[in-house]
Amino acid sequence: MSQTDTVSRILDAAEVLFAERGFTETSLRTITSTAGVNLAAVNYHFGSKKELIQAVFERFLTPFTRALEEELNRRIAEGVPLGVQELIECLYRVGLGSLGLEGKDPQRFMRLLGLAYTQFQGHLRRFIVSRYGDTYRRFAGLLAEALPGLDPETFYWRLYFMLGATIFTLSSHDAIEAILREDFGTRSSLPETLERLVPAASAMLKVDSH
Amino acid sequence: MSQTDTVSRILDAAEVLFAERGFTETSLRTITSTAGVNLAAVNYHFGSKKELIQAVFERFLTPFTRALEEELNRRIAEGVPLGVQELIECLYRVGLGSLGLEGKDPQRFMRLLGLAYTQFQGHLRRFIVSRYGDTYRRFAGLLAEALPGLDPETFYWRLYFMLGATIFTLSSHDAIEAILREDFGTRSSLPETLERLVPAASAMLKVDSH
DNA sequence: GTCTATAACGCGATAGAC
DNA sequence: GTCTATCGCGTTATAGAC
């Protein structure tokens, strides 16, 4: 088995297990045995568990932010100013596309993002901000431009409200979907939920608060 | 030291430490040494770490749900039908009041609620649903009545969007506030954030999606 | 580059003295 | 009801053989 194989087998297993159980709740023993590699391989290839966690995030966030940047460039080159709803749609569409490649479940990455915010891994938050903060600030800037007249503080709070609604809902999508399926007998896929989320999030950003 | 003292000293320490670090990341050794009690006291008084976690939630959720029920009764007795914005205000106001008693930080409880959703503690989710599900369903029912014409599925998804925006934002309130303070030099307290959240959440629930 | 074996430690839980 | 002492297990990380 080549080195690349071992590295990606570890990343594949860690990605799934972290999303299912959390970081502390997932041991290197579980990861390596799921991946079919030796226990020592993680420390050999990544150095430590912390660095493995960062590598898992890097593997999906780097293509995602690159795809988002490219999509924003493409839309801006068209010369049409982007509205609130279009920007949010853009974010979600790129997310679904970039994170759903190779038959992977985009919801898994939403769980990981939710964990990054709630699991008190200071090193992970610092890693994400330093590596992907520029793209985040660019997107926030475009969204702010689409909301002239809104005072900056209220804008930023609402941006966090939107991120909260998105990450929280999508990271529990299966659980919520199961409850609603039982009550209404109807299914609802991730794209359908995003279609519901777009107008709701836009309304939250745009509402006149006076 | 009497039994009640030991029990509440453990609960006080566990409440703070769990909110700061998470459940798995907080050991019984840290809890008991912070509380100034013996390591064995947790297992003696609560039986296990799981049951301690449940007891921490019970101590703040029981007064909160009772206060919410009473406030809903009071408002309904007035005979005026409750609108969306009023119901959300009601929820937040009871939360601030009931969770902020005895000089405690309401945000701490929001962090705990956030953890309950994201930390994969199946036992805790089951405990909360079985103990407080009735009040939750009553509140959701009143909110649905205030939104006639909205199809039930869309309503429930938006209810989760609202919960997500609330729990996610409030559980990270200090961190977000620190970022905005640095950028704008202005402070913003928890009640002020809730004032921003009320119109935003209401708009999200009420918006016409067609 | 990958393995086995193990070091070094922290964990939750409990038995039994007081 | 509270204490000490400890069991048994799982953890990350590493040394050293191959």
Image (cartoon, coloured by chain):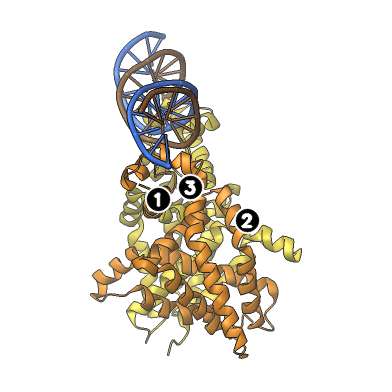
Chain colours: A orange, B yellow, C blue, D brown
Residue plotted at (50% across, 68% down):
A64
**Vertical order, A210 against D10 (above or below):** below
Residue type (three-letter) at the residue carrying disc 1: Ala
Q: Nearer the viewer, residue B190 or B93?
A: B190
- Spot occupied by residue B158 in the image (x, y as percentages of width and height): 42, 75
Residue A79 locus on image (x, y percent): 63, 90
Instruction: Report, in whole angstroms, how far the alpha carbon at label 3 lies from the one at label 2.
Output: 28 Å
Q: Is disc 1 placed on a helix, strand or loop?
A: helix
Q: Position of residue A102 (x, y in %)?
A: 36, 67
Q: Please tell me which of labels 1 and 3 falls first in the chain.
A: 1
Badge number at residue A52: 3
Q: Is residue B165 left or right of residue A40?
A: right
Residue on which the image places disc 2: B174
For disc 2, the neighbor class at 10 Å (few under 14, some 14 to 19, many from 20) is some
User: At 67% from the left edge and 60% from the top edge, which residue is drawn?
Assistant: B179
Read off the chain for label 3.
Answer: A
Eyeballing the image, is A193 above or below B127? below
C-alpha span from label 1 to label 3: 8 Å
Residue at the spot x=41%, y=36% of the render? A40
Q: Which residue is mark 1?
A: A14
